[in-house]
Amino acid sequence: MALTSTTPPAEAAIGTRGDLRDLPWACMARLWSGIVLFAFVLTHLLNHAVGIFGVGAMEYAQQWRWLLWQSWPGTVLLYGSVAIHMVLSAYRITLRRTWRMPKDEAWQIVSGLAIPFLIVGHIVNTRVAGSWFGGDIGYQGVLARMFPAAVFSQSMLLVMSWSHGVIGLHHALRYQHWYRSARVAGLVLAVLIPFLAMAGFIAAGREALQAGPPAPRTPEQQAGLDRIDMMLTSGVAGFALAFVGLMGMFYIRRRVGNTITITYRGYGPVDVPSGTSVLEASRMHHIPHPSTCRGRGRCSTCRVQILAGADALPEPFGAERAVLASIGAPSSVRLACQIRPAHSLSVRVLMPVLGHRFGGDLDAEAREWAMERDATVLVLDVRAFTTLTHNRLPYEIAVLVNRFSAEMTQTVESHGGRIDQMFGDGLMAVFDASDKPASGARAALRAARDMARVLDLLNSEMRGVLPIPIRAGIGVHTGSIVLARVGDGLDDNLIRAIGNTVAVSFALESASKEFLADYVVSAETAKASGFDFSRLQPREVTVDSNGMSVTAYAVPDAATLDAVMAGGVMLGMLGAARS
């Protein structure tokens, strides 16, 4: 999903919604102002982190930071973003119909409310002192005044502002197609940057303290700063009082206003104030209802089918229209977080919370039931299984299948893989490649090679029992899969791999019959593994009836696969020696 959306005329939007929170321009203004503030906090913390190398390094980095944030455009952008973000966020909070929410959403609200009170003193002693009273706002002077007396308050400000921004950025970017691959690196930076910033602040603070006390302020300067500090603190307190008063006014208005009935299929009717979103109604009455974007209209997990009362709802627009179009939803399907009915209606939750839990972490719930991973999938099929089992006693078939299953499971697990499905005449194994794609591809190919040795062992053990030797075809492909938990939410559920990568792996295995090869390895797996497939001729394998095809290599037997892997190892060693 992009960070922009099509916006209809504002007058029409206000007329149908009557809620500033749902206007696309308000959502985008709140988002982009937050991104500007996060960029300011990021550069500030990086400047602090440089303090590990001393106050001089901090002073040098600060000059570059000031070029951006203390210029007239930077100042207007920064303080304009502060005003926009505070006003729109406060207004959005006041319009909440319920305070039941996930923990990260609650923390973002609490931290956002705490930041203005924590930052007033910091602004007065830095930007105000330097711009209005000619004070020394270089790191040497500021650190000498703040360290160690302000370590606790500055630590709290760092934690609150950074965590608030990280949570907001996570929810803003999580539906970008590139975000999943960058998520681990982003998590590392989200933890590392504040730690380095605090370490730099402490190291530079000690150095500044040893250099001697800062230049004393004149009585006029101190009096002026105290006056500004009191004015800013009073302004923040006044804003907070107005905020609380506005919340109380909206609460009273909702209590004395009209109520409507929302009837949930399977849960019955509930009464809520008119204008309450369907998602808020679900939370108010403990009805399991997922929303991974926390009601921001950026995902489709909260969607509902309108069973009755759809005619009284305004047409979807902006973010809701874009999301519904992206999933090809019919006209009866709407986003529960975006519709605020003024009349009674009946709905059905289309994606109920699978674990039947409510009030917990829905992200954890989603990860528990489904997650997207990079992996290598191996599919094996035993050739001529009908012939192998023809005229065999049931006991003999059971012995063969169980022996095959035990040996193959041991082979897969010895290379770090997991048996996803075991068939009577084959299996599917998954080798996780999320941390390093090469590791999953290499493990799968080594397991495929050892599977041939397992078949040789079984053939030698059962030579007098089997009518023909056991042969198998194997397809291997690397890509993105979805690991979904299949079950009823209790104990009897299994994790299954699904997705296009699985389908391609089955197609490659099927193509091994056509190529008269024991293995068919996709070009993606070959590239990820780093093994040398250059001596093999690439083939095109058709995957589905629509003509989709993938490039793959047909490997005749285990000996050839051994040579391919040995060549890749030699190339890697030569590359390391040259470097």
Image (tube, grey):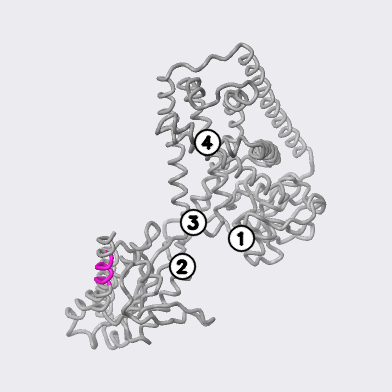
Residue labelled with disc 2:
498
Q: Does the magenta segment cover residue 569?
A: yes
Q: What amino acid is at disc 4?
A: His
Residue for badge 3: 180
Q: Which residues are magenta?
A: 565-572
Dominant SS in magenta? helix
Q: CA distance from mark 4 to mark 3?
A: 27 Å
- Name the N-terminal-most of marks 1 and 3: 3
How many other residues sit within 10 Å of disc 2, few (<14), some (14-19) or many (≥20)? some
Q: Which residue is mark 1?
A: 350
Q: Residue 44 shows which numbered tag? A: 4
Screen quadrant of the N terminus = bottom right
x, y (%) of residue 181?
A: 47, 57
**Number of residues whose C-alpha sits closer than 10 Å to that of mark 1, classed few (under 14), some (14–19) or many (20 or more):** some
- Residue 382 or residue 549, whichever sits in front: 549
Amino acid identity at mark 1: Leu
